[in-house]
Image (cartoon, rainbow, N blue to C red):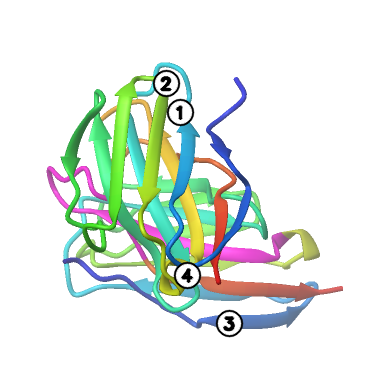
Amino acid sequence: DAGVIQSPRHEVTEMGQEVTLRCKPISGHNSLFWYRQTMMRGLELLIYFNNNVPIDDSGMPEDRFSAKMPNASFSTLKIQPSEPRDSAVYFCASRYRVANTGELFFGEGSRLTVL
Amino acid sequence: TQLLEQSPQFLSIQEGENLTVYCNSSSVFSSLQWYRQEPGEGPVLLVTVVTGGEVKKLKRLTFQFGDARKDSSLHITAAQPGDTGLYLCAGSGAGSYQLTFGKGTKLSVIP
C-alpha cells in the first residue's frame, strides 16, 4: 500500500489567495483526520471524518477553513482567503477503525507558507 | 480539552547515553500512544498502552503507562543517532475518537 498521500508537499502563496490541500487515505480506512502542526502549538486536530461524514469540526480555526470528503478515497482542506498566520504543516491521517486505540497513519504533510 | 505536557522540550545527548522523556496530564486517558516524527515526514506509531501500570518494550525503548492512566514515560537505553527525532505522546479519552497530542520532545543523539 502506498500509504496516505498528500498534495502538494509545498505551497507558497500570497495573503488572500485560496489554498486547497488534498489527501488520499489508505484504502479500507474509514476514519480521516486533518491536523495542523506549528512549533508554537504542536499538532492540532482540525476536523475528523468517519465514513466520509464530518463528525467534529470544532478544531477548524474559523470560517475561512473548510473540508470535504466526497468519497472514501479523497478529501480536501480549503483555506479562503489565506492569511500569514495559516502558515504551518498540514497533515492528513487515516485509521482503519473508529476505536481510539487504532494506529493513525499520517501522510508526509503539506507545508504551507502564506506571504 | 485534555492537555498533554511533554518534558523536556529539547534533549541533546551523546551516543550511548540513557534518557527518559515524560508525558503528563491532569486527565485520565483510556489509551496512550507514542509516535516518532522525523524531519519532513509524518509521525509514525511506536506503541499503544491501554492498561494502568502497563510496560511495553520495543528493543531499546521502554514505555510505561502510569497506574492512574494520567501519565507515561519513554526510556531509551544506549541511545543511537538513529533515535534522533521528535517524540510525541497522544491520548484518547474513554469513548472518544479524538487523539490529543503533546507538543513533543525533540531528541538529538550526537555520534
The mark lying in front, picked from 2 and 3, is 2
The one nearer the camera, A69 or B103, is A69
* Residue A12 located within the stretch drawn in magenta: no
CA separation in Å, label 2 and label 3: 37 Å
Would you place residue A27 above or below residue A23 in this image?
above
Three-letter residue code for mark 2: Ser
**Label 3 element class:** strand
The reply to whether discs 1 and 4 touch (Cβ–Cβ < 8 Å) is no
Q: Are marks 1 and 3 on the same chain?
A: no
Q: Residue B79 sits in which quadrant? A: bottom right
The reply to whether discs 2 and 3 touch (Cβ–Cβ < 8 Å) is no
Q: What residue would you read off at disc 2? A: A73
Three-letter residue code for mark 1: Pro
Q: What residue would you read off at disc 3? A: B10
Marks 1 and 4, the one that precedes in the sequence? 1
Measuring from the top left, give residue B26's x and y in whole percent.
Answer: 18, 75
Three-letter residue code for mark 4: Thr
The mark lying in front, picked from 3 and 4, is 4
The one nearer the camera, B9 or B52, is B9
Quadrant position of the N terminus of chain A in the picture: top right
Marks 4 and 2, the one that precedes in the sequence? 4
Q: Say which residue appears at 73% left-offset and 67% top-offset.
A: B78
